[in-house]
Image: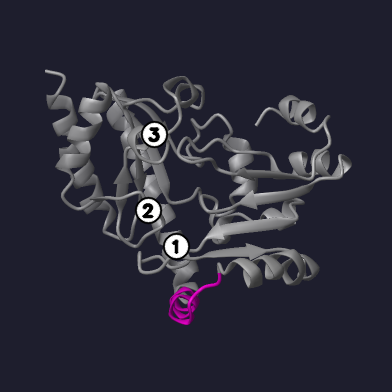
Amino acid sequence: ADLDQWREALATPTTAVFFETPSNPMQELVDIAAVSDLAHAAGATVVVDNVFGTPVFSHPLAHGADVVVYSATKHIDGQGRALGGAVLGPREFVEGPVKNLMRHTGPSLSPFNAWVMTKGLETLDLRVRAMAGSALTIATELERWRDDGRGLGRVVFPHLPSHPQHDLALRQLEGGGGTVVTLEVEGGKAAAFAMLDAFRLVDISNNLGDAKSLTTHPATTTHRRLPPEARAAVGITDGTVRVSVGLEDVQDLLADLDQALAAAEATRR
């Protein structure tokens, strides 16, 4: 999110810049408007992965981005039923290079998957707002548990006042901070695995944005191919756990987190 780094990178000829905001899983934000201004001055197209921001809370095109992409498998489907994606941008872009790529390489949705995604859109706003409300409640409680000595390190959620980019999060994520809470348990991989194995209501899965709450261990799944020093540079440790908050009752989720965290604590005794 350092604009000087963007300026340095854009000093060389650049066709496009691509970023996700908030980032997976540590939820660092990129100032879309500021980076878009820099990129456009350099003649580059701005492409934003808006999965963590969600279509409900984040509107990159309004902040100057040119193209927005989604894994529709996440919030748009919302029930883990179908794989798919979406590309949004100017008509000439979608009907030009995007359509040409789809026609010649075949990444088009099947009719059934397209129907599933369309049905998912009907409840997208309701689902995401409910999930985000629960996520904020959970993140707030996790911070309280950390302060009470429950063996937690960082608790990351964009709309928490403790988030280092909280002001930017309030500007770019209007109405909710997303549906993912990232936390760090003391005790490294052993404690994190004990926590994941102890969950009763939350399932282990690399997916997110589902009606069912899901959790994963980024260091051994989504980011396992990165060397340890690269993971450390973005804040991912062996104790990092990502929780995608679903539509279950928030008190039930807190109870599950409580007993799962107790299992992690037991590994340190």
Q: What residue type is labelled 3?
A: Arg
Q: Distance between the residues labelled 2 and 3?
A: 15 Å
- The part of the image, by quadrant, that contains residue 143 is top left
Give the crowd class for mark 1: few <14, some 14-19, many >=20 residues within 10 Å: many
Q: Which stretch did the figure color magenta? A: 108-119
The image shows residue 22 at horizontal and vertical percentages of 55, 43
> Tag 2 or tag 1, which sits nearer the N-term?
1
Q: Do the residues labelled 2 and 3 touch (CB within 8 Å)?
A: no
Compare residues 181 and 85 and report the one nearer the observer.
85
Give the residue type at disc 2.
Asn
Check disc 1 and give the amino acid type: Thr
Residues marked 1 and 2 touching at CB (< 8 Å): yes
- Residue 157 on image: x %, y %: 46, 39
Q: What element carries label 1?
A: loop
Q: In this view, does 60 lie above or below 181?
A: below
Residue 230 vs residue 37: left or right? left
Q: Mark 2 points at which residue?
A: 207
Q: Residue at the spot x=74%, y=31% of the render?
A: 6
Q: Does the magenta stretch include residue 130?
A: no
As helix, strand or loop, the secondary structure at mark 3 comes to loop
Q: Is-magenta flag for residue 118?
A: yes
| Residue under the point 40% across and 68% down | 82
The residue under label 3 is 224
Q: Name the residue under label 1.
A: 73
Q: Nearer the viewer, residue 86 or 150?
A: 86
Q: How crowded is mark 2: few (under 14 residues within 10 Å), some or many (20 or more)?
A: some
